[in-house]
Image (cartoon, rainbow, N blue to C red):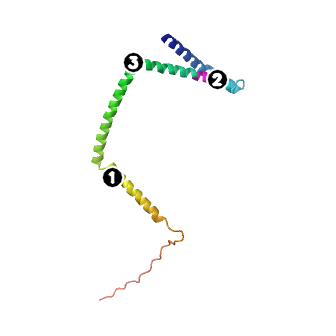
Amino acid sequence: MVKKDTANNMSDAMIAYKALLFDLPMAGTRWGLGSGNEKETTATAWTGYDAMVRLASRTVDGWYRSPLFAQTTARSLEGFLRWQQVGNAFTKTVLTGLAQAAGLPSRADTQALQAEIRALREETTALRATPVGQDLTPEPIKSTPSITRIAA
């Protein structure tokens, strides 16, 4: 089975190599010069693509069948998850302490402030809405009589 997979992998690698580096440029050149057609170029491209997909599928399948790959992946995932937990705990500890030391508001305070701002915005919008016929020109300022000083 291993010899068959290796032979198939080599065959697909050569097909992909030949299609991408020789056949496809030649088909594209013939199409560009008018002696070839789009079907020939497309068929050549698909031949190379199919060979690369078969090669990649067999390679990944081989990795999944390998016990070494499974063990390495399992150990790596365990390590990554542990470091993620350590990082999360460290971040919470440090950022909470820094926020308190800097006097930054808490999340609840910030959300309450946002709610107040939203309410003020709605109130302002409602106050700006005026009937169409209402005159909004300001009244002129009445002059006040000047005060004279009387000497006593």
Q: Earlier in the sequence, mark 3 or mark 2?
A: 2
Q: Amino acid at mark 2?
A: Ala
Give x and y (percent) for residue 23.
63, 20
Dividing the picture into quadrants, the one containing residue 75 is: top left
Which residue is located at x 48 percent, y 12 percent? 2
Q: Sort mark 1 into few (<14), some (14-19) or many (20+) by Cα contacts within 10 Å.
A: few
Image quadrant in which the C terminus is located: bottom left
Which residue is located at x 32 percent, y 35 percent? 87
Which of the pair 106/33 is nearer the observer? 106
Give x and y (percent) for residue 66.
42, 17
Q: Secondary structure at mark 2?
A: helix
Spatial distance from mark 3 to mark 2, Cα to Cα? Answer: 39 Å
Query: Can you identify the residue that label 2 sits on?
Result: 43
Q: Amino acid at mark 1?
A: Asp
Mark number for residue 68?
3
Compared with residue 75, is residue 152 higher up or lower down, i.e. above or below? below
Q: Secondary structure at mark 3?
A: helix
Give x and y (percent) for residue 108.
33, 50
Dividing the picture into quadrants, the one containing residue 24 is: top right
